[in-house]
Image (cartoon, rainbow, N blue to C red):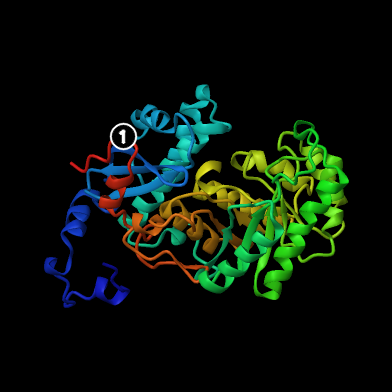
Amino acid sequence: MVRNYAELHDPNAEYTMRNLSSETMGLNAKRGGGRDVEITDVQTTMVDGNFPWTLVRVYTDAGVVGTGEAYWGAGVPELIERMKPFVVGENPLDIDRLFEHLVQKMSGEGSIGGVTVTAISGIEIALHDLVGKILEVPAYQLLGGKYRDEMRVYCDCHTADEADPQACADEAERVVEELGYDALKFDLDVPSGHEKDRANRHLRDSEIRHKAEIVEAVTEAVGDRADVSFDCHWTFTAGSAKRLAAEIADYDVWWLEDPVPPENHDVQREVTQSAPTTPIAAGENVYRKHGHRRLLEEQSVDIIAPDMPKVGGMRETQKIADMADTYYVPVAMHNVSSPVATMASAQVGAAIPNSLAVEYHSYQLGWWEDLVQEDVIEDGYIEIPEKPGLGVTLDMDTVQEHAIDDVFDEA
C-alpha cells in the first residue's frame, strides 16, 4: 500500500493494520524500515516451450518471491544451483551489488560470457521482480521510470516452406491482418535450391536473387502496414553479405540481422558501413556491456540487438542501451522467451529512450500466454503493467503440465 505525504504525517489519519494485506504485514514486520530482508532460496524449473525456458524463483524470509527467466542453454539450472550459496542470506534490494558479486564469484566458470552470464541473468531478473514487490513499484521504476506506456512487439514468422517467397508473403499478410502485428521478421538463411557448398558461406548470384525475392514478396505484401526485418543467423561471408545488402537496398527493409559470423568485429563493421541503405543489426550473440562496446564504439551496427535474459539481465541491458544512445543507435531486443522474460524485456524497453521493439518468437505455440495469469501481448503491443515487479504471475498448473523437470517447491 502506498500512502501520500499527508497520510504519513497526519496523526489522525486512518491507517490501521486491517488496511494491509497479510503479505504486506509480514513484509513490514521483517524489513525493519526496508532493509531487513534476506534471500532464503533460489530454485529453477525448466519448461518445454518452443525453446527450453529456464524459470527462476528467488525466495525471501519476508514471504515475498521474485520470478525471472534465463535464456535456454545446457547447464543453466546447474549453474544457478552453484550460485545459490552466494546469494542466500543476502539482501535482495542490492541488485547491482549482487550482480557484481555473482560475476566475481563465478569468474572461474567464465562469467564474461556464455551460459554463466545467462544463469546470472535469470537471478537478476527475478531480483527485479522481487524488489519491485517489496517496494511496491513496477520493475520499470527500478530502472528510472518509463518513456512509453506500451512496448511494440515484432513477430518472428515462419512457414512450412520458408524458402518459398509466396508462402512468406502469405504468412506476412495473415500475421498482419489476423493477429494484428505491425512489425515482423523472416529468415533469409534458407535453402534456395541453387547451393553448391553451403559450408563455405559464399552466396552465388542465383542465391542472392532468391533471397531478394523473399524480401520483395514480403515487403510488397504488407506495404506500409508493417515494418519487416530479415534474419541471416551469422551465415554468410563478408562479400556475400555486402552483395545481399546492396541487392535489397531498394526494398523497405527495417533491418538485416546478423549477416556475418559474430566473432570478428572488424568484418561486422565493414559490412555495416558498406551497406548503402539497408540497416544492419547484431548483438544477440555477445555478452554484457563489454561485448557490445566495440560494436557501438566502432559504429559496426545500425541497430543493437541484445537478448536481455542472456546478456546479463535488465540493468545490463539498460547499460547497453545507454551506451548505444551515446552513438544514436536504437535497440531492438532479441527474445525467444516465455511470457516472464518477454515482459521483463518490455519493462526494460519502456525504461530506455532508444527502444524500437521486443521480439516474440512463439506465435505458433498455442499455450504460450497460458504460462502466466495475465494477458501479455494485445494486437502486437505489450501494455506495461503498473503492478509491482514484472507484472506477471506464473500459472502453476501450466508450468506443471509443461515442465521438463521438478517444479518449484513452494514450501
Q: Nearer the viewer, residue 166 or 148?
A: 166
Are there few (<14), some (14-19), or many (20+) residues within 10 Å of tag 1?
some
Residue at the spot 63% in from the left edge and 52% down from the top edge: 161
- Which quadrant of the rendered structure holds the N terminus? bottom left
Would residue 258 be seen by someone viewing this image from the given angle?
yes
- Camera-side residue: 48 or 77? 48
Looking at this rendering, what residue extends furthest in the top direction?
108
Q: Is residue 9 above or below residue 71?
A: below
Horizontal side of residue 310 vs 225, given as left or right: left
Q: Is residue 55 left or right of residue 248?
A: left
**x and y percentages locating residue 81 in the rendered image:** 36, 30
The x and y percentages for residue 223 are 71, 73
Can you give x and y, in whole percent of width and height, for residue 393 in the image? 32, 57
The quadrant holding residue 289 is top right
- The quadrant where residue 193 appears: top right
Residue 93 visible within the image? no
- Location of mark 1 (residue): 88
Q: Which residue: 41% across, 57% down?
A: 366
Q: Is residue 183 above or below residue 275?
A: below
Screen quadrant of the C terminus: top left
Q: Judge left or right: residue 264 versus residue 107.
A: right
User: Residue sitting at 34 percent across and 51 percent down?
Assistant: 130
How many labels were placed on the picture?
1
| 20 relative to 309, above or below | below
Report the side of 220 relative to 158 (left or right): right
Rendered view: 238 above or below 133: above
- Find numbered disc 1 in the image and state the secondary structure of the residue it sits on: loop
Q: How far across and how far down the image is residue 166, in percent? A: 69, 62
* Three-letter code, disc 1: Val
Q: Nearer the viewer, residue 36 or 385?
A: 385
